[in-house]
């Protein structure tokens, strides 16, 4: 990683010239004091106390001048991506994902988007794709190393029932829709380490557990992590802010989710366990070769540190002046 120190506003350093005024006043004061001591035949004080305030003022102005110049350290680091690993985030877009704790609270879908973005950010060196599902799955973005592409897809292309489900029942979501992901070209051929992260409220119709088990039993089957958003206390609110009486969670949702996890050997987490989700994802993908895609530029702003350092000489000046 290469780094260089640059000043964004070098002319701001001219603030340090403000030290000339207090130093000139200090010099005039010192000369008057010397003449007065000579007339009164008093001993001159030691050098250190006499220089303490001028040195503190000089340091204060110098530090503020450096801060005004906005020093930053620019650093370039290599952008690496895994060659043998890919992941997909499949987001539930059924109408039940509109449920929220209150009419003013974030919906399940909004929280699902946040979870997806947070987990993606922690898998920066892994190509990750985006899919949605209700009673059918649809890939929106195939595994990509671009974090911006993932974020843009999640924010702009993931919406409730886009596309609409085939069925018209009260509960249209089914984990059976994910059966085709392992062998339908979602992952590039030859990728050894595969991961499917399912973000859902878990409200699924009954599933064909044997069919799912068979689909996820191949040699290159993806590891499965389910992130469950929502709770039984949430409701779907209409435009008038009132809860819709027709919405209710299927009573067998918990059992269906357990069947899906058993069939895929998956692990389940809550929406607040982003750190644990990322660690589990890393563990399932293991380690492998990475290739360099380019460089990532970053910078560290040093101005706040110089401002904080200026507090020390300022406190010294105020203490000596009894302020």
Image: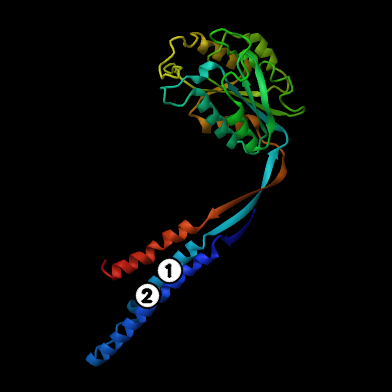
Question: At x 46% / y 61%, what residue is drawn?
Answer: 306
Question: At x 39% / y 77%, what residue is drawn?
Answer: 23
Quarter of the rendering containing residue 32: bottom left
Q: How many marks?
A: 2
Scheme of image coloration: rainbow
**Left or right: 57 in relation to 121:** left
Q: Position of residue 163 (x, y in %)?
A: 63, 18
- Residue 69 lies, with reference to residue 248, above or below; the image says below
In whole angstroms, how far apart are the C-alphas of marks 2 and 1? 10 Å
Q: Position of residue 126 (x, y in %)?
A: 66, 35
Question: At x 34% / y 64%, what residue is drawn?
Answer: 315
- Residue 60 lies, with reference to residue 216, above or below; the image says below
For mark 1, give the secondary structure. helix
* Residue 61 - label: 1
For mark 2, give the secondary structure. helix
Quarter of the rendering containing residue 134: top right
Q: Are marks 2 and 1 in contact (CB under 8 Å)?
A: yes
Residue linked to disc 2: 22
Question: At x 37% / y 75%, what residue is drawn?
Answer: 22
């Amino acid at each position: 990683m290469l780094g260089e120190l640059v000043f964004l506003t070098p002319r701001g350093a001219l603030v340090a010239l403000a030290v000339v005024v207090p130093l000139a006043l200090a010099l005039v004061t010192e000369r008057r004091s010397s003449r007065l001591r000579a007339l009164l035949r008093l001993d001159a004080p030691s050098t250190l106390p006499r220089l303490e305030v001028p040195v503190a003022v000089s340091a204060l102005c110098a530090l503020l001048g450096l801060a005004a110049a906005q020093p930053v350290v620019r650093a370039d680091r290599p952008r690496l991506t895994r060659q043998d690993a890919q992941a997909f985030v499949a987001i539930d877009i059924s109408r039940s994902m509109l449920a929220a704790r209150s009419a003013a609270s974030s919906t399940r879908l909004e929280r699902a988007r946040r979870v997806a973005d947070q987990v993606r950010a922690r898998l920066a060196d892994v190509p990750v794709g985006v899919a949605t599902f209700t009673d059918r799955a649809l890939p929106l973005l195939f595994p990509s190393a671009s974090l911006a592409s993932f974020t843009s897809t999640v924010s702009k292309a993931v919406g409730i029932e886009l596309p609409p489900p085939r069925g018209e029942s009260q509960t249209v979501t089914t984990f059976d829709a994910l059966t085709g992901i392992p062998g339908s070209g979602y992952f590039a051929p030859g990728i050894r380490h595969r991961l499917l992260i399912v973000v859902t409220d878990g409200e699924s119709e009954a599933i064909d557990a044997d069919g799912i088990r068979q689909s996820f039993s191949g040699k290159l089957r993806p590891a499965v992590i389910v992130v469950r958003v929502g709770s039984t206390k949430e409701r779907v609110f209409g435009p008038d802010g009132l809860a819709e009486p027709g919405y209710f969670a299927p009573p067998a949702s918990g059992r269906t989710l357990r069947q899906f996890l058993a069939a895929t050997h998956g692990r389940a987490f809550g929406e607040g366990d982003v750190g644990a989700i990322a660690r589990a994802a890393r563990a399932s993908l293991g380690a492998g070769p990475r290739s360099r895609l380019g460089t990532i530029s970053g910078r560290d702003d040093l101005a706040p540190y110089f401002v904080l350092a200026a507090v020390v000489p300022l406190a010294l000046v105020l203490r000596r002046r009894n302020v």
